Image (tube, rainbow, N blue to C red):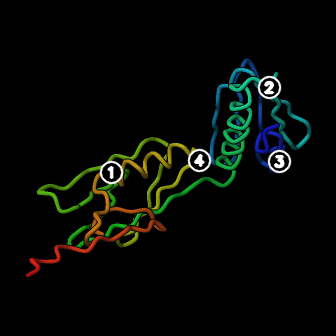
Amino acid sequence: MSRVGKQPIAIPSGVNVSINEGVITVNGSKGELSQPILNGVNISQENDSISVTRINDDAINRANHGLMRSLINNMVEGVSNGFSKKLEINGVGYRVTQQGTDLKLSLGFSHEITFKLPQGISALVEQNTITISGMDKQQVGQVASDIRELRKPEPYKGKGIKYENEYIIRKSGKSGKEK
């Protein structure tokens, strides 16, 4: 049995879960998220918890069992608390400013880059740190990854956009000509 899938999901107060016609919908203080139920998985709701079971022990059903439990848990966590990721911008002249829902990034190119934030995602800019937050864990991670892709950190000086606790392996530069 899946170690992740067999754990029940606790529903906090203020969160409503509804299961109907192959779709699970979770409502909370931050908003509403819905997810289609994967094949080979059954979802049942009792009092303040949700349990996920699988129909049989086929390989695909075992995989979907843990995945569906994780997706539902992330939806419950997202509508009640939300998710956030922090990005740091390092480099001389590298800056970020926020204009409405857009981010203006100066990353050493000949032009400024305008990054439009999607619906449901907000950003907070403090000096050279960007905090991306929202209720959908996958969308928060994807937006943070898209911003990081604009200028990945390089290994010589570490200039670029990196995650808050990311460690950049540094390379030594040219060692010169040996005689």
**How far separated are the C-alphas under marks 4 and 3?**
18 Å
> Which is nearer the N-term, disc 1 or disc 3?
3
Report the front residue among 2 and 82: 2
Mark identifier at residue 10? 3
- The secondary structure type at the circle numbered 4 is loop
Asked if disc 2 and disc 1 are in contact, CB closer than 8 Å, the reply is no
> Which is nearer the N-term, disc 4 or disc 2?
2
Asked if disc 1 and disc 3 are in contact, CB closer than 8 Å, the reply is no
**How far separated are the C-alphas under marks 2 and 1?**
40 Å
Location of residue 96 in the rendering, given as x and y in whole percent from the top left corner: 30, 63
- The secondary structure type at the circle numbered 1 is helix
Circle 1: is it few (<14), some (14-19), or many (20+) Cα within 10 Å? few
Mark identifier at residue 71? none
Mark identifier at residue 135? 4
> Which is nearer the N-term, disc 2 or disc 1?
2
Task: Please name the residue that numbered disc 2 is placed on.
Answer: 57
Circle 4: is it few (<14), some (14-19), or many (20+) Cα within 10 Å? many
Q: Residue drawn 65% across and 25% down? A: 36
> Which is nearer the N-term, disc 1 or disc 4?
4
**How far separated are the C-alphas under marks 1 and 4?**
22 Å
Task: Please name the residue that numbered disc 1 is placed on.
Answer: 149
Which three-letter amino acid code belongs to the residue tagged 3? Ala
> Which is nearer the N-term, disc 4 or disc 3?
3
**How far separated are the C-alphas under marks 4 and 2?**
33 Å
> Which is nearer the N-term, disc 3 or disc 2?
3
Which three-letter amino acid code belongs to the residue tagged 1? Glu
Location of residue 68 in the rendering, given as x and y in whole percent from the top left corner: 70, 34
Which picture quadrant has residue 16? top right
Which residue appears farthest toward the front when viewing the image? 179
Q: Determine whether, in the image, residue 176 is placed left or right of residue 24.
A: left
**How far separated are the C-alphas under marks 3 and 2?**
25 Å
